[in-house]
């Protein structure tokens, strides 16, 4: 990892983060990108393209007073900004105030009606997003908002000091709402996310970004690309087969539609990346048809 360059943030002396609490993030470090911050400001340049840091590195980072995590197609954040946002979510969307997943709250008086709820969408849910990553919000009549972050261009603070006072925390009363509870969003939340995604005609950027680590494929099991590596695979086994003049899935296999199976992988999504379509594949799991029961033999009656 390249040595980062520092930028922004108030001139704090040393990290004040609790190591025991911070190390509860360790199981997620290989999947998501954690960033040292001061207040709400990342302390590294070009953080949307950074691979992140281990927790010990963040704890030792100069002037670090908080930890951010990069959102993305695999890390959804619902940001409740005010009491009316909770009322809207409950009355209009049927979203319970207790989400059952990872929640980030504030312990100061100003932050009583502020909460971030984080979820990790399942591969099946990800395949339903029509235009890739996005961010959006619904404003209430009171001028507050319920925001959705599903883009690598956003990071949210998940622990440490808030610049206006107070601290971020994860509720520990039963049920626990720490990072250990991170799960896929329930139907009512995912339906809301899909509804907002329909309004986004184009993704924020003509490419696909996952908040988790991906690896280049050499060769790609779909198109066979083995030079100028571009195709990638996530830790969950999702493959992004990229278009090209020398290598491409449809150049090798002919026209493909969602649902087609290639070399044991099913096409689940097409995304325009400006120079053609990126094809998203998942391991094909055929549905077995129930066995047809044997027809009973006709009995012959002898008179």
Image (spheres, rainbow, N blue to C red):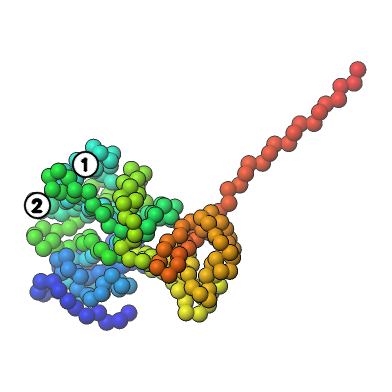
Relative depth, front residue between 13 and 289:
289
Res 110 label: 2
Residue lying farthest to the bottom in this orientation: 3
Name the quadrant of the N terminus: bottom left
At 56% from the left edge and 69% from the top edge, which residue is drawn? Answer: 251
In space, the residues marked 1 and 2 are separated at their CA atoms by: 20 Å
| Disc 1, SS | helix
Where on the picture, by quarter, is residue 12?
Answer: bottom left
Above or below: residue 122 compared with residue 218: above
* Residue 255 position within the rendered picture, expressed as x and y whole percent measured from the top left: 56, 61
Relative depth, front residue between 8 and 204:
204
At 22% from the left edge and 75% from the top edge, which residue is drawn? Answer: 44
At 36% from the left edge and 44% from the top edge, which residue is drawn? Answer: 187
Please state if 161 lies on the left or on the right of 286 as rendered.
left
Where on the picture, by quarter, is residue 36?
Answer: bottom left
* Residue 294 position within the rendered picture, expressed as x and y whole percent measured from the top left: 73, 36
* Residue 50 position within the rendered picture, expressed as x and y whole percent measured from the top left: 30, 73
Please state if 112 lies on the left or on the right of 34 as rendered.
left
Q: Which residue is mark 1?
A: 88
Crowding near the residue tagged with mark 2, few <14, some 14–19, many ≥20 C-alpha atoms within 10 Å: few
């Amino acid at each position: 990892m390249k040595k980062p360059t520092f930028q922004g943030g108030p001139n704090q002396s040393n990290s004040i983060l609790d190591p025991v609490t911070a190390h509860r993030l360790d199981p997620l470090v290989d999947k998501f990108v954690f960033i040292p911050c001061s207040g709400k400001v990342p302390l590294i340049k070009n953080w949307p393209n950074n691979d992140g840091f281990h927790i010990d590195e963040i704890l030792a980072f100069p002037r670090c007073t908080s930890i951010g995590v990069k959102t993305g197609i695999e890390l959804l954040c619902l940001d409740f900004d005010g009491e009316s946002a909770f009322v809207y979510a409950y009355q209009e969307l049927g979203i319970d105030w207790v989400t059952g997943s990872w929640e980030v709250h504030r312990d100061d008086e100003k932050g009583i009606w502020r909460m971030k709820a984080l979820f990790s969408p399942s591969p099946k849910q990800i395949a339903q997003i029509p235009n890739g990553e996005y961010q959006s919000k619904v404003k209430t009549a009171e001028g507050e908002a319920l925001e959705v972050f599903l883009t690598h261009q956003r990071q949210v603070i998940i622990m440490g000091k808030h610049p206006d006072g107070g601290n971020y925390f994860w509720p520990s009363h039963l049920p626990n709402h720490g990072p250990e509870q991170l799960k896929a969003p329930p139907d009512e939340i995912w339906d809301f996310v899909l509804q907002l995604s329909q309004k986004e005609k184009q993704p924020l950027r003509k490419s696909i970004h996952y908040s988790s680590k991906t690896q280049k494929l050499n060769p790609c099991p779909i198109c066979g690309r083995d030079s100028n590596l571009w195709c990638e695979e996530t830790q969950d086994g999702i493959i992004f087969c990229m278009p090209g003049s020398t290598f491409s899935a449809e150049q090798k296999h002919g026209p493909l539609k969602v649902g087609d199976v290639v070399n044991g992988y099913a096409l689940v999504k097409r995304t325009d990346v400006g120079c053609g379509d990126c094809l998203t594949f998942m391991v094909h799991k055929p549905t077995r048809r129930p066995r047809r029961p044997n027809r009973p033999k006709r009995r012959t009656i002898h008179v």
